[in-house]
């Protein structure tokens, strides 16, 4: 998706690029990084274009070594008299957000070009680091403590490791966490108002707006939102939403959590709408469901991320739906039938 935007117009000429850069730089100097992370997540939710621009700018920031805003020096002529956003500490005299538009655009150009450079992950720094993937891309990041994060397509995390704290925010998409055991430094993942906390284990989280699903492959994870806490062990899966809280814990095959590492998406009684939303981060053509009956069908099974379009075309063999392949999208609609759920291919919990 980011490539399509770049092909349409130079990224540094896109006004959203400057907004994205301002949010990224604010994160790196904020006294309240969690709030800054949530601001980025809200900005990304405005449109697919916002998400694509943010992903591209985040990759550029990474490629340039996660620029320290305190090291930006453009001289007095590069500053104006605007006040910094409330609650954010200026990194230099006047702050990065006070750079004149021309100066900020120059930095956008550098970041856009830097997105093509080699990425250096897991640097030992107290400044938060943002990692993101593009459409169809999967990437494994090794953090400073040796833990690994595997990001699915169109996903992003913000990593903050300082002192006894190991904190990650899943801004969008999905991630598999292989956490190095360290009882003195609990590993926390913040997502949609929930915190998943563990000492050393393997678990996956998919974020869908203000909702998330946590699946544990090994060890124990404590998930809480300030109102309730749920303890998850290997083979447990729970859905969460900021409005409804935690759903019931389901016992499943714990290896489902490892699917993203193996180029797969795996589900057990998920709505077809959620499955399609995930599939759209990988497929060559966008898939659209046109009616609520089809959206609400329950799906259990496995998708290969390199054959999403073929999977969509085969859905009528297992579900009461019709599939129409059009030039720019694949359209799914309900069809007469009695089955409301199926396994494709057959899957056991």
Image: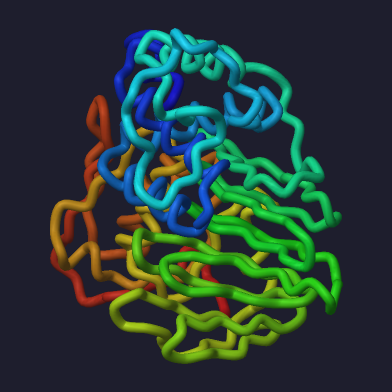
On the image, the x and y values in percent for residue 231 come to: 61, 90
On the image, the x and y values in percent for residue 19 come to: 35, 30
Q: Could you tell me which quadrant the N terminus lies in? A: top left
Q: How is the image coloured?
A: rainbow
Residue occupying image coordinates x 50% and y 57%: 32
Where residue 318 sits, quadrant-wise, is bottom left
Residue 253 seen by the camera: yes
On the image, the x and y values in percent for residue 28 come to: 57, 41
Residue 147 lies left or right of residue 339; in this view the side is right
Residue occupying image coordinates x 52% and y 90%: 229
Residue 6 seen by the camera: no
Residue 312 lies left or right of residue 253; in this view the side is left
Q: Is residue 115 above or below residue 39?
A: above
Q: Is residue 38 above or below residue 90?
A: below
Q: Is residue 269 above or below residue 18?
A: below
Q: Is residue 226 above or below residue 264?
A: below
Pick the residue in front: 183 or 268.
183
Q: Could you tell me which quadrant the C terminus lies in? A: bottom right
Residue occupying image coordinates x 63% and y 47%: 128
Residue occupying image coordinates x 28% and y 70%: 297
């Amino acid at each position: 998706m980011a490539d399509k935007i770049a092909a349409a117009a130079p990224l540094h000429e896109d006004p959203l690029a400057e907004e994205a850069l301002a949010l990224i730089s604010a994160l790196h100097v904020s006294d309240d990084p969690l709030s800054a992370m949530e601001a980025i997540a809200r900005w990304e939710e405005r449109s697919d274009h916002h998400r694509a621009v943010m992903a591209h700018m985040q990759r550029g920031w990474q490629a340039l070594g996660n620029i320290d805003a305190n090291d930006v020096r453009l001289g007095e002529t590069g500053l104006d008299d605007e006040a910094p956003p409330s609650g954010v500490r200026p990194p230099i005299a006047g702050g990065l957000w006070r750079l004149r538009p021309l100066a900020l655009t120059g930095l956008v150009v550098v970041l856009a070009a830097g997105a093509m450079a080699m990425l250096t992950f897991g640097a030992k720094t107290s400044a938060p680091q943002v990692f993101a993937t593009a459409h169809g891309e999967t990437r494994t990041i090794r953090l400073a403590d040796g833990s690994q994060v595997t990001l699915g397509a169109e996903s992003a995390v913000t990593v903050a490791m300082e002192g006894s704290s190991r904190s990650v925010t899943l801004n969008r998409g999905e991630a598999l966490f292989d956490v190095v055991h360290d009882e003195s430094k609990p590993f926390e993942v913040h997502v949609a108002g929930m915190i998943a906390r563990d000492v050393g284990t393997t678990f996956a989280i998919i974020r869908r707006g203000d909702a998330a699903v946590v699946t544990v492959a090994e060890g124990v994870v404590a998930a809480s939102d300030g109102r309730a806490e749920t303890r998850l062990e290997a083979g447990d899966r729970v859905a969460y939403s900021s409005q409804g809280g935690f759903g019931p814990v389901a016992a499943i095959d714990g290896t489902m959590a490892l699917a993203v590492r193996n180029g797969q998406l795996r589900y057990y009684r998920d709505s077809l709408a959620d499955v399609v939303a995930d599939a759209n981060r990988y497929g060559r053509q966008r898939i659209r469901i046109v009616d609520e009956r089809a959206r609400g069908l329950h799906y259990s099974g496995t998708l290969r991320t390199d054959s999403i379009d073929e999977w969509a075309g085969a859905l009528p063999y297992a579900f009461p739906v019709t599939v129409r392949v059009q030039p720019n999208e694949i359209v799914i609609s309900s069809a007469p039938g009695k089955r409301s759920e199926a396994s494709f291919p057959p899957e056991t919990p």
